[in-house]
Image: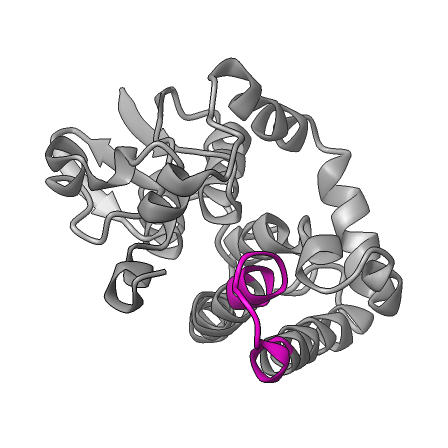
């Protein structure tokens, strides 16, 4: 059985969605980043990058959420484009999420909600770039039911993981700026697998307080400037 190291953050949740959609048996193992689980030697032996998620499948460790999506989809033969010629575009969109949507959304959240002042420049940059990426997705979905056309794939799952947090990434009503993405999110959220994935974090207790200890675990870079 696959061991799935996770928490409720966007990247682990998109893997949870695929596991549920594909009906893959798995053991969920919580990684509480505010408690520092990600830095424990037994976990960095699995994911040297000290992030969630990671999986261990038949003794093989795989980390990075998009790598896990691709690995599991190829192993199961599910949620990939049926047309071989679409593999290249699928990889392009998957990497678009990996290199753009995730990082800019994550940094937008960080600077809006956690970074100390002054931060206007950083907030403006990451808010702008997050919005730009979601507009590109919305434009794509204006002409396609899913990101890869008529087929629901891991690209849609990767986007779902992050787009769930658009109100926190951008602003409370920002999803209204992306009507086609909003339509896709509604369709995915209505799927039983998405409901099960969303419910997964409630099965474990994660630290909710962002106290000094949590900040040290989450933002170790601050030690360099005495913050």
Q: Is residue 114 magenta?
A: yes
Q: Is residue 195 magenta?
A: no
- What residue is at 44 percent from the left and 34 percent from the top? 7
Residue 59 at what x, y percent from top left?
11, 31
**Snapshot colouring:** one colour
Looking at the picture, tell me which residue is in the foreground, 199 or 140: 199
**Quarter of the figure with the N terminus:** top left
Relative vertical location of residue 94 with respect to residue 29 in this rendering, above or below: below
Residue 195 at what x, y percent from top left?
67, 27
Q: Quadrant of residue 146?
A: bottom right
- Left or right of 76? Residue 55 is left
The region drawn magenta spans 106-123
Relative vertical location of residue 12 with respect to residue 4 in this rendering, above or below: below
- What residue is at 56 percent from the left and 79 percent from the top? 122
* Dominant secondary structure, magenta: helix
- Judged from this view, the residue extending furthest toward the front is 226
- Judged from this view, the residue extending furthest toward the top is 203
Residue 17 at what x, y percent from top left?
54, 37
Q: Count up the numbered dots.
A: 0
Q: Quadrant of residue 212?
A: top left
- Left or right of 43? Residue 7 is right
Residue 197 at what x, y percent from top left?
57, 29
- What residue is at 35 percent from the left and 32 percent from the top? 35
- Left or right of 227? Residue 120 is right
Looking at the picture, tell me which residue is in the foreground, 33 or 71: 33
Q: Quadrant of residue 144?
A: bottom right
**Quarter of the figure with the C terminus:** bottom left
- Left or right of 153? Residue 143 is right
């Amino acid at each position: 059985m696959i061991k799935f190291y996770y928490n409720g953050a966007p990247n682990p949740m998109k893997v949870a969605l695929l596991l549920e959609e594909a009906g893959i048996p798995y053991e969920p193992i919580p990684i509480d980043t505010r408690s520092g689980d990600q830095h424990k030697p037994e976990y960095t032996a699995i994911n040297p990058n000290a992030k969630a998620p990671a999986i261990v499948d038949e003794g093989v460790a795989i980390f990075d959420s998009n790598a896990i999506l691709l690995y599991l989809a190829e192993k199961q033969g599910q949620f990939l484009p049926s047309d071989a010629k679409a593999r290249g575009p699928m990889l392009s969109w998957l990497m678009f999420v990996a290199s753009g949507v995730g990082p800019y959304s994550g940094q937008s959240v960080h600077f809006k909600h956690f970074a100390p002042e002054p931060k206007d420049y950083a907030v403006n940059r990451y808010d702008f770039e997050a919005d730009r990426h979601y507009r590109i997705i919305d434009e794509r979905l204006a002409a396609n039911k899913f990101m890869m056309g008529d087929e629901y794939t891991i690209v849609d799952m990767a986007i779902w993981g992050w787009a769930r947090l658009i109100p926190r990434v951008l602003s409370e009503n920002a999803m209204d700026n992306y009507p086609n993405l909003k339509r896709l999110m509604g369709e995915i959220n209505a799927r039983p697998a998405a409901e099960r994935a969303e419910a997964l974090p409630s099965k474990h207790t994660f630290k909710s307080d962002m106290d000094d200890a949590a900040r040290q675990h989450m933002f170790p870079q601050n030690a360099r400037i005495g913050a």
